[in-house]
Amino acid sequence: MNCPDIRENLVAYLDDEIEGAPRRAMDAHFTLCAPCAGERVAMASTWALLDREALPASVTDESPSANAAFRAQLHERIAAGAGASAGGRLLRMAPALGATAAAGLLAVAGWAWMKSDPPAPPVEHSSVGSPDPSPSDPAAAPPRELLINLALLENLDLVQDEDLQDLETLAELDPDDLGILGG
Amino acid sequence: MADLDAPLMQAFQEGDLAAFDTLVDRHRARVVRLAFRYLGDENSAEDLAQETFLRVYRSKHTWKPAARFSTWLHRVTVNACLNELRARRARRGVESTASAGPDGTLPQETSDPKAPAPGDALLREELAAKVRAAIARLPEDQRVAVLLSKYEDLSYRELADALDRSVPAVKSLLVRARENLRQSLEPYLGFVSPAETGLDDAGDAIERRKQERRRRRETGAGEMTS
């Protein structure tokens, strides 16, 4: 090893990142080269000086009571943050949720319009006995996606905070969990 | 060596809050120390440690068992420190507290290094202040590398993981950092005894030193200094 090699690897040597034969080669060089040996001492001394840094007692306190106090405060912040976080996410999602609501309402209106009978001629008597459009008719059932949107809109408070990451997540929710379908 | 924190973190990911508390107990002190060294005051360090563990709590699912928990935690801590420093700068309207030039070198210290040496009673305090100032003057990337290497005993590989850099980049960073520190602390190098440098250690002593570092990292035990 020559002097430039030594200087290039000196810090890694001091950090014990160089081992085995290369390290022994560097050690041998230091015994023969006063400038490199001096550089080695100066760099090692610089690093050792960093041990003179003094820390305040509060920063070095590793007692169980210090841990317990820290944890108590942390749990308070976690509890407080959970509410704030859910509210914050809802606020951030407000435009998207609004769009979903609008789309849902439009879809409902469209579905109702499409499924409505043409305007019937005015009748003077009760239509008792006449066939009603049956809600149990599969052909007349509203689309599942529409029901999901409506269910989400009506049950936002039931949706877990962690599910409110984005609308894709909302779309993946099982509407049955919201108690709207199949109930 | 196995990552003793990994089973705790996995348990926490599965909802075990007691495991989270154990992780907090094991790492709180080192997070507070790192934050103090980065930010320079006790209250901010405590607040930042709280913020760090809040991030751990909220981001628990982003940790993967392939990564050492301590390395991941260092990364979270460093990011929180950097965010805090940026926020401070924004509040102050200052572009940067790091005063290094474009080449990474530092301006000369304004105090006169040839001034009369302080008395013995003040020497420790004087030296501690000089060391803190020298570290504080480092550019951010060099400073965090020094703090994690010197005080948290991270290897180059661990530093690379924590800082999201390559090992050669970490090596280069530490070379520049040490050169800057040497420049700042040159007048005080004479206060260091040969024994403090560890240069007289034989090969087996070096190996013991490395094993001790590994043990400290594994157990979350206190640092090697102070």
Image (cartoon, coloured by chain):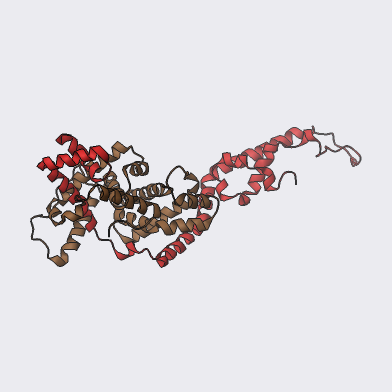
Chain colours: A red, B brown
Residue in view at x 33 percent, y 50 percent: B211
Residue in view at x 10 percent, y 61 percent: B117
The reply to whether residue B103 is visible in this rendering is no
Q: Is residue B106 above or below residue B226?
A: above
Q: Is residue B72 left or right of residue B12?
A: left
Residue B104, how many percent across, how many down? Answer: 21, 41
Q: Is residue B127 left or right of residue A99?
A: left
Please tell me in which quadrant of the rendered image residue A14 appears: top left
Please tell me in which quadrant of the rendered image residue A170 appears: top right
Q: Is residue B129 above or below residue B106?
A: below
Residue A131, how many percent across, how many down? Answer: 88, 37
Q: Is residue B36 left or right of residue A79?
A: left
The reply to whether residue A71 is visible in this rendering is yes
Give whichever of A96, B166 is nearer the camera: B166
Residue B221, how many percent across, how many down? Answer: 37, 57
Residue in view at x 14 percent, y 53 percent: B189
Residue B164, how many percent across, how many down? Answer: 36, 40
